[in-house]
Image (spheres, rainbow, N blue to C red):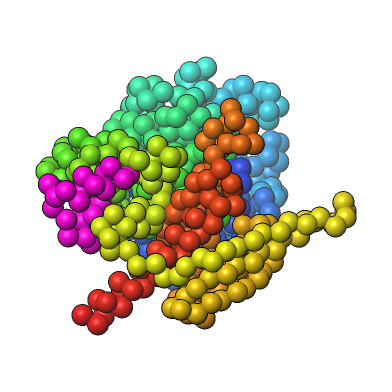
Amino acid sequence: MKRIAIYDTTLRDGAQGEGISFSVEGKVRVAKRLDAFGVDYIEGGFAASNPKDMAFFKEIKKEKLAHAKIAAFGSTRRANTPVAKDAGTRALLEADTPVVTIFGKSWRLHVKEVLRTTDEENLAMIADTVRHLKQHGKEVIYDAEHFFDGYKDDREYALKTLRAALDAGADLVVPCDTNGGALPHEVFSIIQDVIRAVGPKVGIHTHNDGETGVANSLEAVRAGAVQVQGTTNGYGERTGNANLTSIIPNLVLKMGCDCLREGSLKQLREVSQFVDEIANVRPNRKAAFVGDSAFAHKAGMHVDAVRKVARSFEHIDPAVVGNERRVLVSELSGASNIFLKAVEMGMNLDKTSPEVKEILRELERQEKEGYEFEAAEGSFKLLVQKVLKAHRPFFTLEGFRVIVEKRHRSEPCLSEATVKLTVNGETEHTVAEGDGPVDALNSALRNALTRFYPQIADVVLTDYRVRILDPETATAAKTRVLIESSDGRQTWGTVGVSGNIIEASWEALVDSVEYKLFLEEKKAGKKNG
């Protein structure tokens, strides 16, 4: 198996993406998780850029990493500045990392218009910096910035910049598609030519501006590159960097390359979600390999085929990357969807049973009313129970009232909700305030139920979405509310539909609580059984 080194630059290049930010503690946690995953290199930050990155380099030295090498990132020395006196080079040494990655110019346009120096001085800047860092015992990786643009403009000069780095002792040179505009066939032919010209110590660094970052990385490997640089989940400037969560499984499963320690690939989805969590980014449901929708099937014929032969509609086994198959239910569903969904939920149903057809009819009826169950599996479970006459309500609503009051134009609105319920023959009447009417209603509902069902105390709403179903009817339009809830271990969605947004929200809130109580009841039944 061909060995491909994985170089993760999430903490540096990824952090340059819009909306992405890591604390020092967060960077350390991500680095430790990437190390456990089996990444070879972790680029921790720009040594001369900011105190936070330097603080990371200091903190990460206290950790005992099992596999990965930490790299500090910086540039070649400044033009017409002795390397020993260059502040950026000194910062790279002060970072005290085993690996240093420096970038330099490959495109004569940048040499002339950005650096405002000569071709010869640019080559000297590259060589001097590499040589100086090697003299200090560093493993040096040279990132050839804008290489593909430079190569197309002047092949000979672009190759000279790589030779300057290698002749000075660089351990690896990495052509970079910094603008993200190269196409896969171009990357393949250019990397082949580079390897013929300068030797095999070549990596690849691509961006995703043309939506070809992953393909370009794979083509570079096919052409002979031995290292791939990218970011977890494709974070990065503009449209992002090459996405390692797609590149790694493609290399391992499709191209037969050795990238990680044996058995690590099944951690891929977990690592992806961990990094999203630390970066405070909502996971991309449609992400290849790791997203919630990556192995989600909706069309009835597809679901039936997957039930018979999984690989008929799945390019890999989801479990290999730590993911799982999901069966979606909607008006497009067939009996196979309902049957497999029931099996997934632990229900004993036969595909040909009349109950399956009855559930399908009720599903179609409710979807005509505006309900949607793809992202509301909690509500779908309750729907199935109701059709099968297996649903037991945990409480009965006697009534609720929501008041929104604005006392002065300079003050925020006040929201108050009152809820009256009957639980096990007892009436509970509570009131609560909230940041808005739905928040107040949610608090009042929890206050009323917690005495009877303390299990709901750890449930929090993680998402609240509203969609207007009939926009042409303006304020009289029907509203769909989707709520996502979590107890820290599981996450579930519920849905409500009404011409009144508060009533739709109430319906989704009730389903959320009842689904949690159903899960607890089921868990207790298994223990007792």
**Image position, residue 456 (x, y; %):** 48, 72
Prevailing SS of the magenta stretch: helix
Q: Taking 504 as reference, is 190 above or below it?
A: above
**Image position, residue 467 (x, y; %):** 54, 40
Q: Can you tell which quarter of the image residue 405 is in?
A: bottom right
Tell me the magenta residue range: 339-363
Q: Residue at x 58, y 36 (%)?
A: 477
* Nearest to the observer: residue 61 or residue 454: 454
- Check if residue 15 falls in the magenta segment: no
Looking at the image, how many numbered discs can be counted on the residues?
Answer: 0
* Nearest to the observer: residue 28 or residue 104: 28
Where the C terminus falls, by quadrant? Answer: bottom left
Q: Residue at x 25, y 57 (%)?
A: 388
Would residue 121 appear left or right of 163 to someone viewing this image? Answer: right
* Nearest to the observer: residue 462 or residue 48: 462
Q: Residue at x 16, y 48 (%)?
A: 354
On the question of residue 385 being in view, the answer is yes
Would residue 466 appear left or right of 203 to someone viewing this image? Answer: right
